[in-house]
């Protein structure tokens, strides 16, 4: 089957300008997304994954944020070059987004049905009555009982899980090509998390869209993603298929993340952790950004930043260990000792 | 909602009793004997004593007050000490003028305040925003009687665009209404601005943007409706100070309304008129507050749960 690229992000850079300096929140992120595929973007808090997703819809709060470089090609159209009016027609229509906080992401004074119906009216030009009926259908589709009644209610009358379903219904109302789900399950309890993930996966099958799933939860990623991009300090440090990444993590950071997962069948006294903290985005080291926390770091790592290397088709890593220079550098070190 | 309205209507009874009692006591505390003022300065002691007897001013305070309440319950607000006209007629003759003035003033307060607040909030820290907020600061700082005199000097005396005083045509309404509404408009503008600025940073505004909604729909439908909740409270409070303001503004522009009637009556110690006037004004205030609370519930349905 020939793969069809829906979204291609090239060298995206989103910086924040403040009195403290320039924070490089997203610093040269690239990835591609095929039709029907689910890409997981993982990384710890502050690694730039949410800012990457907001950049895709040009929703970065500005000022202080600004997308300073890169291309975001949606079906070969660069989103960064669109006029405000053209962008508006894509938002919620071709790309839509589910946010992290279902409690605050819905307007508290409008009925949830109206909040879904308004984007249907806008993008599909349906009449008020037809759009409302479609909104009710969408609420039914995400598995909320008594959708006719629920549609008329306001967010405060719904539970957190139901509100997130409403967000999903809203995001999918215009059957977008790409759905960005920014930690959609983080604020929910575990049983609801599983339900929400099921709903997203089922709808993906029905509607055939591509998904970017942003999370710090590796368990969720393993369950639903076809491929994964691991982010660290504003950059992608490793990219590969889900199976490959979990079985054979290349980057020491990915390895650290997987090691720090609790294991069901091993007797562990203490969970493994990655020592140190993420460097400040105002002041990244000149070399590899992970070098300070990396057990394998050498002089080379501290002095020069590694490129994102393609080690095999579909597998990329940003680490000196997999480069030609590494052999030479380690030899040099051994010789000086 | 119905229960809430009934409860609030029932509260009017103690409020009314309280208002009459406080006004009655204050009027007793003000120096100056109504009988002496009424009889004129050169009047003999006998005349004054007779007058006092006729007016019932010799009776103990408690008796005077219960008499007043008894009459009030029968719909009799008493008679003016000055011209013996029924208080009710004096009030109904002037009340429409004050209501008209208050209506246009609150209209100016709401429309000017909201528009200025929204414009400021859309482009915060812009030239327009800073300019509007300086004007708003002036609006809050200038006392209405002084603003009234300034406006009168500029538009009536210098430019001859508007009449100096009186209440005969639409042109007469402009200056008093602007004078009375300006302070409120300034407060509403500042409140709208800060409330809008808070709301536009909320997550649901980001959601609205992510849906691809048009800018004006985001501002008017998604942001303003949420931002209005505190603004409604401020408008309600403004209405109270607006009623107080009519006293000053009606005096400055020689408008023969309720406010000026009360001021004149205080000067001549015309107790029944003062009591009647203040009673009506406070009833209006109570009803406006009730109206504001109902609006507040319509805009903020979460309150209905409590």
Image (tube, coloured by chain):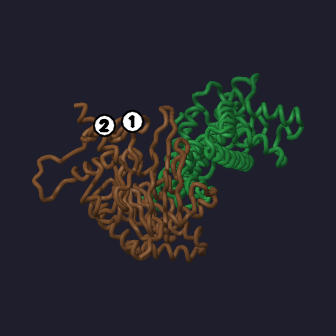
Estimate the x, y position of residue B295 in percent, counting from the top left: 55, 55
Estimate the x, y position of residue B252 in percent, counting from the top left: 76, 34
Density class for disc 1 (Cα within 10 Å; few <14, some 14-19, many ≥20) is some
Mark 1, chain letter? Answer: A
Estimate the x, y position of residue A144 in percent, counting from the top left: 38, 72
- Colour of chain B in the rendered structure image: green
Mark 2 → mark 1, Cα distance in angstroms? 9 Å
Q: Which residue is mark 2?
A: A292
Q: Nearer the viewer, residue A321 or A171?
A: A321
| Vertical placement of residue A216 versus B131, above or below | below
Say which element carries label 2. helix
Mark 2, chain letter? Answer: A
As drawn, is A217 to the left or to the right of B13? left
Q: Nearer the viewer, residue B187 or A33?
A: A33
| Quadrant of the image occupied by residue B173 | top right
**Which quarter of the rendered picture does the C terminus of chain B lie within?**
bottom left
Tell me which numbered mark, 2 or 1, is placed earlier along the sequence. Answer: 1
- Colour of chain A in the rendered structure image: brown
Q: Which residue is mark 1?
A: A285
């Amino acid at each position: 089957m020939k793969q069809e690229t829906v979204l291609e992000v090239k060298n995206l850079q989103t910086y924040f300008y403040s009195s403290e300096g320039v924070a490089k929140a997203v610093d040269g992120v690239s990835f591609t997304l095929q039709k029907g595929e689910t890409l997981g973007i993982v990384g710890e808090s502050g690694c730039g994954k949410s800012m990457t997703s907001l950049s895709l819809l040009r929703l970065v709060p500005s000022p202080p944020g600004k997308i300073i470089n890169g291309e975001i090609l949606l079906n070969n159209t660069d989103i960064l070059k669109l006029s405000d009016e053209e962008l508006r027609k894509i938002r919620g229509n071709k790309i839509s987004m589910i946010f992290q906080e279902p409690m605050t992401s819905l307007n508290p004074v409008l009925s949830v049905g109206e909040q879904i119906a308004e984007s249907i009216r806008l993008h599909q030009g349906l009449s008020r009555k037809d759009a409302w009926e479609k909104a009710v259908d969408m609420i039914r589709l995400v598995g909320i009982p008594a959708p006719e009644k629920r549609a008329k209610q306001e967010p405060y009358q719904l539970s957190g899980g139901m509100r997130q379903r409403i967000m999903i219904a809203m995001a999918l109302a215009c059957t977008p090509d790409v759905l960005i789900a920014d930690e959609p399950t983080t604020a929910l309890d575990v049983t609801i998390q599983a339900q929400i993930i099921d709903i997203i996966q089922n709808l993906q099958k029905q509607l055939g869209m591509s998904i970017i799933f942003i999370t710090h939860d590796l368990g969720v990623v393993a369950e639903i993603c076809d491929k994964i991009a691991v982010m660290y300090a504003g950059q992608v440090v490793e990219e590969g298929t889900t199976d490959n990444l979990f079985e054979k993590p290349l980057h020491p950071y990915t390895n650290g993340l997987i090691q720090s997962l609790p294991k069901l069948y091993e007797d562990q006294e203490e969970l493994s952790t990655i020592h140190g903290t993420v460097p400040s985005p105002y002041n990244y080291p000149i070399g590899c950004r992970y070098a300070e926390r990396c057990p394998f770091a050498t002089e080379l790592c501290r002095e020069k930043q590694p490129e994102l290397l393609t080690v095999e088709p579909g597998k990329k890593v940003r680490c000196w260990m997999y480069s030609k220079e590494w052999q030479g550098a380690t030899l040099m070190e051994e010789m000086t000792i | 909602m119905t229960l809430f309205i009934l409860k609030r209507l029932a509260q009017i009874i103690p409020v009314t009793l309280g208002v009459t009692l406080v006004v009655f006591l204050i009027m007793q505390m003000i120096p100056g004997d109504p009988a002496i003022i009424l009889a004129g300065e050169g009047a003999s002691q006998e005349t004054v004593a007779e007058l006092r007897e006729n007016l019932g001013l010799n009776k103990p305070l408690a008796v005077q007050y219960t008499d007043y309440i008894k009459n009030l319950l029968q719909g009799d607000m008493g008679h003016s000490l000055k011209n013996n006209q029924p208080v009710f007629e004096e009030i109904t003759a002037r009340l429409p003028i004050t209501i008209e003035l208050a209506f246009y003033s609150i209209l100016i307060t709401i429309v000017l305040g909201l528009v200025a607040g929204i414009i400021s909030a859309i482009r915060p820290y812009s030239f327009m925003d800073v300019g509007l907020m300086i004007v708003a600061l002036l609006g809050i700082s200038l006392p209405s009687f002084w603003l009234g005199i300034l406006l009168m000097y500029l538009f009536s005396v210098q430019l001859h665009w508007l009449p100096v005083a009186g209440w005969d045509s639409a042109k007469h309404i402009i200056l008093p209404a602007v004078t009375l509404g300006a302070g409120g408009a300034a407060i509403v503008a500042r409140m709208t601005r800060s409330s809008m600025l808070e709301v536009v940073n909320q997550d649901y505004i980001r959601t609205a943007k992510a849906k691809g909604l048009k800018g004006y729909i985001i501002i008017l439908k998604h942001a303003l409706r949420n931002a209005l909740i505190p603004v409604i409270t401020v408008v309600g409070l403004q209405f109270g100070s607006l009623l107080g303001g009519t006293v000053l503004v009606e005096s400055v522009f020689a408008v023969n309304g309720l406010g000026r009637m009360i001021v004149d009556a205080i000067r001549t110690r015309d107790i029944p008129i003062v009591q009647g006037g203040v009673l009506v004004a406070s009833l209006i205030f109570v009803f406006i507050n009730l109206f504001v609370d109902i609006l507040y519930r319509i805009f903020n349905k979460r309150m209905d749960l409590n």
